[in-house]
Image (cartoon, helix red, strand yellow):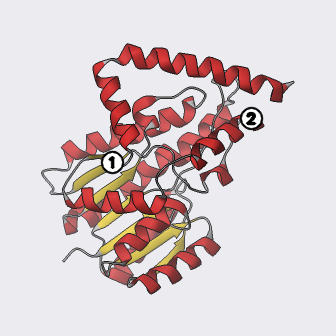
Amino acid sequence: MQNRMMITGAGSGLGREMALRWAREGWQLALADVNEAGLRDTLALVREAGGTGFIQRCDVRDYSQLTALAQSCEEHFDGVDVIVNNAGVASGGFFAELSLEDWDWQLAINLMGVVKGCKAFLPLLTRSKGRIINIASMAALMQGPAMSNYNVAKAGVLALSESLLVELRQQEVAVHVVCPSYFQTNLLDSFRGPTPAMKAQVGKLLESSPITASEIADYIYQHVAQGEFMILPHEQGRQAWQLKQQHPQALYDEMATMAEKMRSKARPAQA
């Protein structure tokens, strides 16, 4: 029976809500994050919800920490059935303003952290015929303005997931990629961007989201069970993706208009 799961970024937000959703089904959970206090809180909530597990501090930029986490899953659970590569950070800013360090930071966590997570856990997943759930973003599909490094990182997660989907079928390892739009989360705690105005704009988007991290976790649970590869939890996101597939130019024009508005709003803050 498959009931052993590892989640990165489990100390808060969507990672925590996914842990609780699977805990309600009695799963054993390996919870990883750089935030140990958050992890302790998540584990307490997991136990209340009917799950069990352990916590381990893990920075997904460090491959040796991920292989150590895989080893811990082997020791505690005798393997793993599902891994969730969820750890991520937010950033924003127009391309001209983003430094190369901003790019390195974003790609190291949001893209290479997922690559390393898949790599470290693949031997265990091959053995258990398990599944990979990679958390990308609608940014992987829509590439909104003033977030090029985030867009590229998340598009990379989507491309990696598509690659693994076809490569791992023969090994009977299932792959899913989740592309949520904005939702209520503490992602802004790690936000990195050149202007305060940009952070404020992203904050408004997060607050205005009609869907919570808990609802997204439940949507993911249902659609993973149905074997769906690309999971789009937001109705608006599903509509936008459909529009892009049918009329890409209309979407690019809309995004360009949005970029102009964002520039005009951001200027006073830079003065």
Quarter of the rendering occupied by the N terminus: bottom left
Q: Position of residue 29 (x, y in %)?
A: 39, 76
Residue placed furthest toward the left: 170
Side of 82 where 71 appears, left or right: right
Q: Quadrant of residue 23?
A: bottom left
> Tag 1: residue type?
Val
Which mark is in front, 1 or 2? 2
Horizontal arrangement in the rendering, residue 165 relative to residue 144 (left or right): left
Q: Quick check: can you spot residue 121?
A: no
Residue name at image x 31 percent, y 44 percent: 161
Viewer-proximal residue among 144 and 6: 144
Q: 10 Å neighbourhood of mark 2: few (<14), some, or many (≥20)? A: some
State left or right for residue 31 relative to residue 26. right
Q: Is residue 254 above or below residue 81?
A: above
x and y percentages locating residue 46 in the rendered image: 45, 80
Of the pair 219 and 106, the residue shown nearer to us = 219
* Badge 2 element: helix
Does residue 174 appear in this view?
Answer: yes
Tell me what residue is drawn at x 35 percent, y 24 percent. Answer: 244
- The residue carrying mark 2 is 197
Q: Quadrant of the C terminus?
A: top right
Q: Which residue is mark 1?
A: 177
The secondary structure type at the circle numbered 1 is strand
